[in-house]
Image: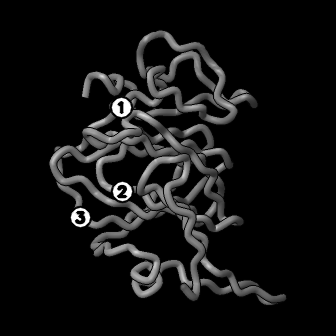
């Protein structure tokens, strides 16, 4: 593999991978290949990505935990600007690690990418003042196909960095903040998801 380093089955969860591209830098800046189908195939991945998505979020925004119900997607996610804590939760039926989570900090500086297979729930928390987040996916967007799991489901127990607050039995962001006082910011829909036992 010429331009990527792949760490497979991170967190002991089969299929979850961290991909680190080779970065060629000098006094002028840097260059890197952000995606190479050839390198991915050499690493054992046979994925046909069909859509790229990008979002911008401010500090304290938490998006997730989302999944697609009937049209599950493999995602390759990374950060263009800023820093996020990115989380995947295994919800594959029959998986030995069902309900287990893994998180990684993705930043513009470390340039790490997170490969998340189909049938995982996914979410991220913005740690910097702003973050631009992008991801490739292997199926198109299908309206009304989104499901979710409560970001703070105690049965999963995601350890979101810097988040302080007390679980009150719902996914409401009320009473939660980052350690520096920045309120946690979730969409109305993301504050209504139930726990993993209810999906």
Q: Earlier in the sequence, mark 3 or mark 1?
A: 3
Is label 3 in contact with label 2 (beta carbons under 8 Å)? Answer: no
Identify residue for label 2.
117
Mark identifier at residue 139: 3
Which residue extends farthest top? 168
- In which quadrant of the rendered view does residue 131 lie? bottom right
Q: The N terminus appears in which quarter of the rendering?
A: bottom right
Q: Residues within 10 Å of mark 1 (few under 14, many from 20)?
A: many
Q: Nearer the viewer, mark 3 or mark 2?
A: 2
Q: Residue at x 52, y 26 (%)?
A: 157
The residue depicted at 44 percent of the width and 83 percent of the height is 42
Q: Residue furthest front?
A: 96
Real-space CA distance between mark 2 and mark 1, rounded to the nearest whole angstrom:
17 Å
Q: Nearer the viewer, residue 20 or 185?
A: 20
Q: Which residue is mark 1?
A: 149
For marks 3 and 2 on the same chain, the one whose residue lies earlier in the sequence: 2
Q: Secondary structure at mark 2?
A: loop
Compared with 44, 15 (above or below) is: above
Q: CA distance from mark 3 to mark 2?
A: 12 Å
Q: Is residue 185 above or below residue 72?
A: above
Label located before the other in sequence (2 or 1): 2
In the displayed structure image, the side of residue 33 where residue 153 appears, left or right: left
Frontmost of labels 2 and 1 is 2
Q: Give how far across and how far down residue 61 sits, in percent.
A: 54, 40
Quarter of the C terminus within the rendering: top left
What residue do we see at 53% from left, 49% from top?
Answer: 57
Q: Residue at x 66, y 64 (%)?
A: 108
Helix, strand or loop for disc 1: loop
> Above or below — where is 188 with respect to 73?
above
């Amino acid at each position: 593999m010429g331009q990527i380093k792949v760490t497979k089955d991170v967190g002991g969860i089969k299929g979850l991978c961290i991909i680190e591209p080779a970065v060629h830098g000098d006094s002028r800046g840097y260059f890197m290949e952000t995606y190479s189908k050839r390198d991915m195939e050499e690493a054992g991945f046979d994925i046909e990505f069909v859509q790229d998505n990008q979002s911008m979020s401010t500090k304290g925004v938490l998006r997730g935990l989302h999944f697609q119900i009937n049209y599950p997607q493999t995602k390759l996610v990374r950060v263009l600007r800023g820093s996020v804590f990115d989380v995947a939760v295994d919800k594959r039926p029959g998986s030995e690690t069902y309900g287990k989570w893994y998180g990684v900090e993705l930043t513009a500086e470390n340039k790490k990418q997170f490969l998340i297979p189909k049938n995982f729930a996914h979410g991220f928390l913005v740690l910097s003042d702003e973050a631009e987040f992008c991801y490739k996916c292997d199926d198109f967007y299908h309206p009304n196909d989104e499901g979710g799991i409560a970001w703070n489901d105690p049965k999963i127990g995601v350890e979101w960095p810097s988040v302080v607050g007390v679980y009150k039995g719902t996914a409401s962001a009320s009473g939660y903040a980052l350690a520096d006082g920045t309120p946690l910011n979730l969409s109305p829909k993301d504050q209504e998801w139930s726990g993993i036992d209810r999906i």
